[in-house]
Amino acid sequence: MNYNITLIPGDGIGPEVVAEAVRVLDTIASNYGHSFKFTERLMGGCSIDKFGSSLTEETLADCPERTDPSAACSLCEKGSVCSQICVPSKCTTR
């Protein structure tokens, strides 16, 4: 399976945590034949320093499933519409 993932290291979950998550996903990709395309965007203090805004339109545009409430959840087999980040263990539509 192929996935496009927007990485948003910011305040709290910083670059060091995101880097480790990428390492885990790269291991999953190599072990199970998945493909992950990563795009990194800024959020929080580092985004304010660089762009003058904590969350830019460019960052939002790279996250259509999260910013478009009509988009189907990417983790749900039923294609339900989620208004929150999908957490499979808490999904009520499965």
Image (cartoon, rainbow, N blue to C red):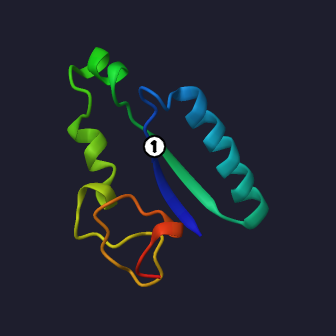
Residue 51 lies in quadrant:
top left
Above or below, comparing residue 7 to residue 67 in the picture: above
Q: Position of residue 67 (x, y in %)?
A: 25, 55
Q: Position of residue 65 (x, y in %)?
A: 33, 61
Per the image, label 1 sits on a secondary structure element best described as strand
Q: Position of residue 64 (x, y in %)?
A: 29, 57
User: In the rendered structure, which amino acid carries the disc numbered 1?
Assistant: Thr
Position of 80 with respect to 27 (left or right) is left
Residue that protrudes farthest toward the right in the picture: 31
Q: Which residue is drawn at 58% across and 55% down?
A: 36
Above or below, comparing residue 79 to residue 6 in the picture: below
Where, quadrant-wise, is the N terminus in this rendering? bottom right
Query: Which residue, given by chain and number where applicable, does mark 1 sit on?
Result: 39
Above or below, comparing residue 91 to residue 57 in the picture: below
| Tally of numbered tags | 1
**Residue 77 or residue 50, whichever sits in front:** 77
Q: Position of residue 44 (x, y in %)?
A: 33, 26
Position of 44 with respect to 9 (left or right) is left
